[in-house]
Amino acid sequence: GQQQTQQMRNVWFVLCLQGTSSVVPSSTHAEAIKRLLVIGDIEQSEIRSIGSKQNFCNSVYKIESAYVAKVYSASAKARCPVSERGYWDEKAGEVGLGPRVIAKTEDALLLEYVEGIAPSADFLTTKYADHAARRLAEMHALSFSGPHASARPLWRSIETALSKTKDSVTKAATELSADDLRSRAAHLRSTVIDCLGEPRVLAHGDCKFSNLLLLEERDDVLFLDFEMSGPNYAEYDLAKLCRQCADDCDLFIEAYNYYTQRITNLQTVHQSTEIQRLAISLLATVSWFEAACFFLLMASSPSTQDDTKSGDSDAWLQLARDRFTAFLVAESAFTDSDLVTLRRYYPKIKVEQEQRRRR
């Protein structure tokens, strides 16, 4: 009802849980937040109440009505090196694709609070889907030159997770050893690069409903949580977003292509839609594998006072098992003929598009 809707508005940005809880942060989190406020030149007296929500990776605290502090968990730090923590959040905030960053450290991030709501299950059928398609096209049109242009956050995330995952955990969830999964990951990476070449766009990397913020007052959409952002494939973002609502993704992809053409002045290349769908299918397979590896990492992580989400190993194992099963299903549906088609056409299409963009 109306009260529930208001509760969702009060939750920082994204989480589909209702309300906030009055939580006193642990001493470690309190110190991380205090350091952010000092860097941001924000007076301590502004902190009267702190609400907290935790998602898979980070602990999030709403400070007054103006700020949000995000404290990274151990698993988030493992997947995102110090030099990149907050880097893409900052870049996104500068161009209006995400909340503005006020201060950052290796442990936490302070952002402006933005009033918004979380997407509903039928998000791709609402007017906000069109806004999200436009915003995603804008992100993919940005340059990723700079200190992290050579980063490959997708493969790094997989490699890091598997390097820290115990054999007993991988076998319980997948019936494979960690070495077997590392071989599987290497094969996946080789296949993707063979078919699609190296990444060509700045991608969000974790583009799912929970990382979108719908702005009712501005009739717009912002992205959140950029720890997985960096050079990647446009189709990876499309795959991760559309896999949550596959039946409704066609119109979203059409809208995305329309805005991409408008922003980059590219004309549709013959057969590119078919090739695009094949690339999305291939990268959806990779996204399920990456998700399985992440939950394997969570299942292998010890519980600590400041990272309480790591404690329920059985729950993480089940999530890893579900994602790995989805990966196997998606992998089996992708044929050798599909791979041949991608190898033949995808690189050529992308080269033609880049040449037109330069003109």
Image (cartoon, rainbow, N blue to C red):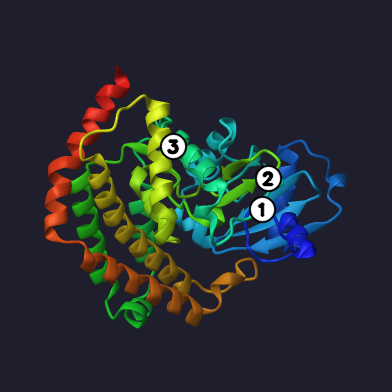
- Please report whichever mark, 2 or 1, sits nearer to the chain's N-terminal start: 1
Q: x%, y% of residue 295? A: 44, 69
The residue positioned 61% from the left and 71% from the top of the image is: 308
For the N terminus, the image quarter is bottom right
Q: Which residue is mark 3?
A: 137
Identify the residue shown where x is 54% and y is 62%. 121
Task: Give the mark nearer the N terminus: 2 vs 3.
Answer: 3
Q: Which residue is mark 1?
A: 117
In percent of width and height, residue 271 lies at 20, 40
In the rendered structure, the answer to whether residue 143 lies left or right of residue 48 reads: left
| Residue position marked by numbered label 2 in the rendering | 216
Please name the amino acid that badge 1 sits on.
Ile
Q: Are marks 2 and 1 in contact (CB under 8 Å)?
A: yes
- Give the crowd class for mark 3: few <14, some 14-19, many >=20 residues within 10 Å: many
Q: Position of residue 337 (x, y in %)?
A: 12, 56
Secondary element type, mark 1: loop
Q: Is residue 230 above or below residue 247?
A: above
Q: Residue at x 26, y 49 (%)?
A: 279
